[in-house]
Image (cartoon, helix red, strand yellow):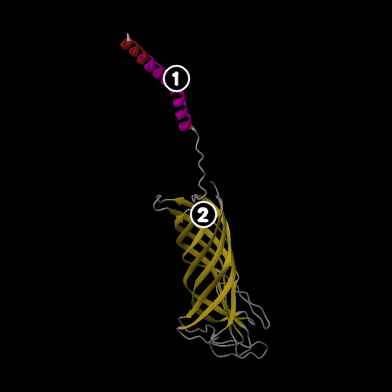
């Protein structure tokens, strides 16, 4: 009887444990299940560089624009007649006193304003976070310098540069919300050059310039013409995503406008006639330093 009682008691204990465990297992399972499906808050990445962007820039720039004189001046008229009833033929002459191989360099600096539009595309990996892009920009300023000629202090040379367009590819490396990049591409700008001679021996103010010219009587003369010179741009910069959409940065541009040979008439303003031909080669190097503010579309 004692052995039989012990067996009954052990059986009852086993039944109790099994029934208790079974009754508690659904609650345990529910607890695990609820923890597994609970939503996890994931913060949006504020440092996404991909997308289209637009912006405005301002800064300062400098330029060096050499004038090279490859050939001597050519007096095409054989001389100039003085005005009035008693006209006297002046002998052939040089008007700007340049010599073959001589050189003059115009230097100037100016505040700049510009705008840009572009697109960035992430092309790297988590280990090498690269961003490729394409950007177009327009820059203008007040590059306009008139200086005395180094060959004759009575003459002046004027250089003006404006309307700089660039189309460049960019490649950047990112550290979260910071990107450093380099760029290379095509550039073009408008350059105007004007040479003004004080007087000829007959006291005629004269002028030579690119392309079209406008002449006046009396003691003054003026000319103005713009021509496009093409070249290349190279530079780099650093940008910071202030927010998901606002980008600030700093950029440096070197712009080289290729050499162009010019042969333009020298005009006596008293007569409006051509008295000589002025030959020169013009090229320019610009260094542009700007701060940038942009808006990037998308998240």
Locate residue 276: give its quadrant: bottom right
Of badges 2 and 1, nearer the viewer stands: 1
Q: Relative to residue 291, is residue 182 drawn left or right?
A: left
* Quadrant in the picture for residue 292: bottom right
Q: Is residue 285 left or right of residue 146?
A: left
- Look at 51% across and 54% down and name the residue there: 118
In the rendered image, which residue does mark 2 sit on? 118
Badge 2: residue crowd in 10 Å (few <14, some 14–19, many ≥20): some
Q: Earlier in the sequence, mark 2 or mark 1?
A: 1
How many discs mark residues in the rendered view? 2
Q: Position of residue 155 (x, y in %)?
A: 59, 85
Instruction: Work out whether 17 lies above or below 99.
Output: above
- Which residue is at the far left? 3
SS at badge 1: helix
Q: Residue 21: give x, y in percent of width and height.
A: 41, 21
Q: Secondary structure at mark 2?
A: strand
> Is the stretch drawn in magenta largely helix, strand or loop?
helix
Asked whether 151 or 141 is in front, the reply is: 141
Q: Is residue 185 positioned above or below 119 on the image?
A: below
* Residue extent of the magenta highlight: 11-36
Q: CA distance from mark 2 to mark 1?
A: 65 Å
Q: Residue 126 at what x, y percent from top left? A: 41, 50
Is 23 magenta? The answer is: yes
Residue farthest toward the top in the current orientation of the protein: 1
Residue 244 placed where, x, y %? 55, 50
Nearest the viewer among 95 and 82 is 95
Q: Which residue is mark 1?
A: 23
């Amino acid at each position: 009887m004692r052995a039989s009682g012990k067996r009954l008691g052990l059986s009852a204990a086993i039944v109790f444990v099994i029934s208790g465990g079974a009754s508690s297992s659904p609650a345990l399972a529910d607890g695990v299940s609820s923890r597994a499906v609970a939503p996890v808050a994931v913060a949006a990445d504020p440092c996404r560089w991909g997308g289209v962007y637009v912006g405005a820039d301002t800064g300062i720039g400098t330029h060096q624009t050499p004038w090279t004189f490859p050939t001597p001046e050519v007096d095409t008229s054989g001389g100039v007649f003085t005005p009035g009833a008693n006209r006297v033929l002046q002998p052939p002459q040089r008007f700007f006193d340049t010599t073959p191989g001589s050189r003059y360099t115009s230097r100037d600096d100016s505040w700049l304003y510009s705008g840009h539009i572009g697109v960035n595309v992430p092309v790297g990996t988590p280990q090498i976070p690269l961003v490729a892009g394409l950007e177009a920009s327009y820059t203008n300023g007040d590059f306009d310098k008139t200086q005395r000629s180094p060959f004759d202090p009575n003459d002046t040379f004027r250089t003006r540069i404006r309307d700089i367009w660039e189309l460049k590819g960019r490649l950047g490396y990112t550290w979260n919300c910071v990107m450093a990049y380099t760029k290379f591409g095509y550039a073009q700008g408008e350059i105007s050059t004007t040479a003004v001679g004080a007087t000829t021996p007959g006291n005629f103010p004269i002028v030579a310039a690119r392309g079209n010219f406008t002449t006046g009587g009396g003691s003054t003369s003026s000319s103005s013409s713009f021509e496009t010179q093409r070249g290349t741009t190279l530079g780099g910069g650093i940008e910071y995503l202030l927010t998901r959409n606002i980008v600030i940065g700093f950029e440096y541009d070197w712009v080289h406008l290729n050499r162009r040979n010019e042969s333009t008439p020298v005009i006596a303003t008293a007569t409006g006639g051509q008295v000589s031909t002025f030959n020169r080669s013009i090229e320019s190097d610009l260094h542009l330093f700007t701060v940038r503010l942009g808006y990037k579309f998308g998240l």
